[in-house]
């Protein structure tokens, strides 16, 4: 037998094995008396620095709920998760797959991936929620919900905190916005456009950057010429670290106040920029910090250290552990209200999502409540400051009232 | 065209026919029956995969005409798709024009933008042209992101479902029919284009532009025509993509997508009609396979969550390297070899 023939046979056998193993593998996952939920996770791609710890956390949390708590209302949760690679067309396919596979609802990590899924989900009345969201996703409210306040709410909360606790000057403080060139960045700008005048803040500059930026010296030089009192950054950790380092190099910081939206302020920011560079930087985040004395902290820490020790200290892990607890609560409410046999996505939305009332996610973030007309499930944030390399809370929970956006 | 042993062409019409034998017609009929009954037995998931494949085939066919036939390398194809997507989105959402107007306008506008970015092709080629088309990618996306009064910038723009003559294409099944009909028209157009004077001029320019010019081919005209056709099809694909996803954001069109399109036509086979079809199906199915198998592997072998997510990038990189080394003429060439061997079977010669 020559090599060519051998290779051909090996190829055919491999193909046959792959074709055989796929249904076997999926069959191994299937079981009765389970409630299905879908996760569209950006595990790889440009947002993986956030997607990976978040994906790890929610899958760890599902493991905890199924194995230690026996599932929800006596039923195991079957998770169908897919890596959307932060790609809109993949997210659109995933949402169809999740509907096809009988998931009762779905979640995404990012506002961008929810944006790519939202229209298909809304048309099919298939509910879902995004962990991090932009104002446009829930305005007007349809079938998509936001786990936490959005990037616009961060801006509003930080601005109020600044005016009440930091601003010592006369007149109106001058703020420069440095925004990631997507909904993460521009969500903050939308709120600034609506509220800055009312709060008494002058927006003197709006600069943008990409997720892969390597220098922002040029944009910061333009900002510096305008003498702002505040630099507000709504971005992700990597570009935020570049901006702050460049601000230090230009002598802008320390000297002005730097505030960050919740996608920027994680332990990775400190790792990327260095603790001395980001010392004193403020940020808004909707969860507690690692080590805080809240009921859910011990179990979450145990799972994180056992299964994903690298994620310990990353606040995104906390966010998505809380996401897992909310997923379970929605399912529990729906099962108890309509029974396992009557569960449909519409029933879950009506008797799960819309019945959420002051649900406590083990203290990890503010209470979760559905309010008609406001699809943000949790409505409070906290202001943090980086002190001695630690992300330290400087406020308790701050309510984030619904901002009256008027999107055309 | 290769014909089965014993088949002869006696007229010019027979020689030019795409489907020459009864077997060809029977296979075409079978393919169409399978294709158009697919929504009856495929679920939403497979239909959405097929819809994405269909849209990608239209875009890749455009790129294949530009790069595969005419030899003008474009690394800004996702930008031209974005032009089509946003044209259709703006016309149907903000101006409330019918879908068909949006679809055709998307193609024409993307084609015109392609003409502008194609002008450098008269003076530069190869690597330098590639760089100028990358510029197109960045400029287009920047304009879309910042022309907020029209495109709504980073907020994104929602797109109503496609609708023709009172029929609204909301479900994946109905969109499947719409997309597949346009795919068939596109492939038929591309097949015929390659056999016309224009197609032959494209190939002449690709093979040796100096010799083509000496033969009397107007390089400026034909290169721009290739850009127009390639970008027109990108625009049509963009329009369909917009109505399929239902929401457009400039983030949906990245440089990586443009590179992926190049990868698809390389894997499929440059300068062949079937190449983009094979390349697109191969890449998109590979993506689905990896997306499907990764969580199953983790569940079955109790791997830590996320352990298998590195498989995707590795497999794509490996596939492109292997094709470039082992089969640079792509899957279309393999298909030709298979057909030739099938026709002669059981004889070796």
Image: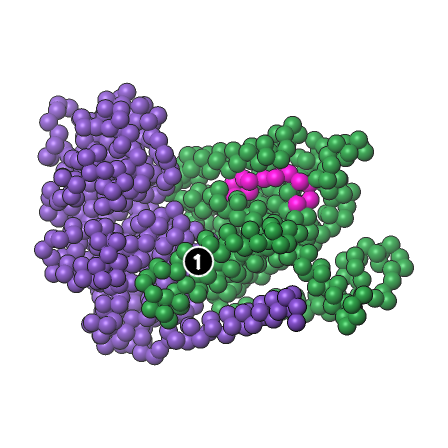
Looking at the rendering, in which quadrant would you find the C terminus of chain A? top left
What is chain B's hue in the picture? green
Task: Give the percent coordinates (x, y) of residue A17.
Answer: 51, 72
Residue identified by numbered label 1:
B311
- Which residue is drawn at the image coordinates 54% and 55% (left, top)? B319
Outermost residue toward the right in this view: B10
Task: Give the percent coordinates (x, y) of residue A70.
Answer: 22, 74
Residue A190 shows in the view: no
What is the crowding at mark 1: few (fewer than 14 residues within 10 Å), some, or many (at least 20)?
A: few
Disc 1 is attached to a residue of which chain?
A: B
Task: Give the percent coordinates (x, y) of residue A186.
Answer: 33, 39
Task: Work out whether A276 lies above or below A133.
Answer: above
Of A249 and A381, the residue lying toward us:
A249
Give the side of residue B91 with respect to residue B307, left or right: right
Give the side of residue A328 with respect to residue B103, left or right: left
Q: Is residue B74 magenta?
A: yes
Of A60 and A231, the residue lying toward us:
A60
């Amino acid at each position: 037998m020559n090599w060519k023939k051998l290779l051909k046979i090996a190829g055919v056998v491999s193909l046959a094995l792959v074709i055989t193993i796929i249904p076997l593998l999926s069959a191994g996952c299937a079981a009765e008396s389970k409630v299905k939920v879908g996760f569209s996770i950006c595990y790889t791609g440009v947002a993986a620095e956030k997607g990976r710890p978040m994906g790890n956390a929610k899958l760890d949390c599902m493991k905890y709920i199924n194995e230690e708590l026996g599932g929800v209302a006596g039923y195991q949760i079957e998770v169908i998760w897919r890596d959307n690679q932060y790609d809109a067309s993949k997210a659109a396919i995933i949402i169809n797959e999740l509907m096809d596979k009988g998931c009762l609802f779905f979640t995404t990590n990012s506002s961008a991936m929810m944006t790519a899924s939202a229209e298909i989900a809304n048309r099919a009345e298939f509910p879902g929620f995004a962990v991090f969201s932009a104002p446009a996703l829930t305005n007007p409210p349809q079938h998509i919900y936001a786990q936490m306040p959005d990037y616009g709410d961060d801006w509003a909360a930080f601005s109020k905190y600044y005016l009440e606790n930091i601003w010592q000057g006369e007149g109106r403080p001058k703020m420069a916005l440095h925004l990631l060139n997507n909904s993460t960045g521009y969500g903050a700008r939308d709120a600034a456009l609506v509220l800055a005048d009312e709060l008494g803040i002058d927006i003197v500059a709006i600069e943008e950057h990409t997720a892969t930026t390597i220098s922002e010296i040029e944009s910061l030089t333009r900002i510096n010429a305008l003498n702002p009192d505040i630099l507000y950054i709504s971005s992700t950790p990597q570009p935020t670290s570049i901006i702050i380092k460049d601000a230090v190099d230009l002598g802008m910081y320390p000297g002005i106040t730097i505030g960050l939206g919740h996608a920027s302020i994680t332990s990775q920011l400190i790792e990327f920029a260095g603790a001395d560079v980001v010392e004193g930087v403020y940020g808004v985040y909707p969860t507690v910090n690692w080590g805080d004395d809240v009921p859910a902290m011990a179990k979450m820490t145990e799972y994180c250290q056992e299964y994903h020790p690298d994620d310990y200290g990353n606040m995104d892990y906390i966010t998505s552990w809380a996401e897992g607890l909310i997923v379970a609560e929605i399912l529990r409410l729906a099962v108890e209200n309509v029974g396992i046999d009557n569960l449909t996505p519409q029933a879950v939305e009506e008797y799960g999502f819309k019945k959420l009332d002051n649900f406590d996610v083990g203290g990890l973030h503010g209470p979760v409540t559905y309010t008609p007309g406001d699809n943000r499930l949790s409505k409070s944030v906290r202001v943090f400051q980086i002190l001695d390399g630690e992300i330290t809370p400087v406020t308790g929970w701050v309510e984030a009232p619904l901002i009256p956006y008027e999107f055309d | 065209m290769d014909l089965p042993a014993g088949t002869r062409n006696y007229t010019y019409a027979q020689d030019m026919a795409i489907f020459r034998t009864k077997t060809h017609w029977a296979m075409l009929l079978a393919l169409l029956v399978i294709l158009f009954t697919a929504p009856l037995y495929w679920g939403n998931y497979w239909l959405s995969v097929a819809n994405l494949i269909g849209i990608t085939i239209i875009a890749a066919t455009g790129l294949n005409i530009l790069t595969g036939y005419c030899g003008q390398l474009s690394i800004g194809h996702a930008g031209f798709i974005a032009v089509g997507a946003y044209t259709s989105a703006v016309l149907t959402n903000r101006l409330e024009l019918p879908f068909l107007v949006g679809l055709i306008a998307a193609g024409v506008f993307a084609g015109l933008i392609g003409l502008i970015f194609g002008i450098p092709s008269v003076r530069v080629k190869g690597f330098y042209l590639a760089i100028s088309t990358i510029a197109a990618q960045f400029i287009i996306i920047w304009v879309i992101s910042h022309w907020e009064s029209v495109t709504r910038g980073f907020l994104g723009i929602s797109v109503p479902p496609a609708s023709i003559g009172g029929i609204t294409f909301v479900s994946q099944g109905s969109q499947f029919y719409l997309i597949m009909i346009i795919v068939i028209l596109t492939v038929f157009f591309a097949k015929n284009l390659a056999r016309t004077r224009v197609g032959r001029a494209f190939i002449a320019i690709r093979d040796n532009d100096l010799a083509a010019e000496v033969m009397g081919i107007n390089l400026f005209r034909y290169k721009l025509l290739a850009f127009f056709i390639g970008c027109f099809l990108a625009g049509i694909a963009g329009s369909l993509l917009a109505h399929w996803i239902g929401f457009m954001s400039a983030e949906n069109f990245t440089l990586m997508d443009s590179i992926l399109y190049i990868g698809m036509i390389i894997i499929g086979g440059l300068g062949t009609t079937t190449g983009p079809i094979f390349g697109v199906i191969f890449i998109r199915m590979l993506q689905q396979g990896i997306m499907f198998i990764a969580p199953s592997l983790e569940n079955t072998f109790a791997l830590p969550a996320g352990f298998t997510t590195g498989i995707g990038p590795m497999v794509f990189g490996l596939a492109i390297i292997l094709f470039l080394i082992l089969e640079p003429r792509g899957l279309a060439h393999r298909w030709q070899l298979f057909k030739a061997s099938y026709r002669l079977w059981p004889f070796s010669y």
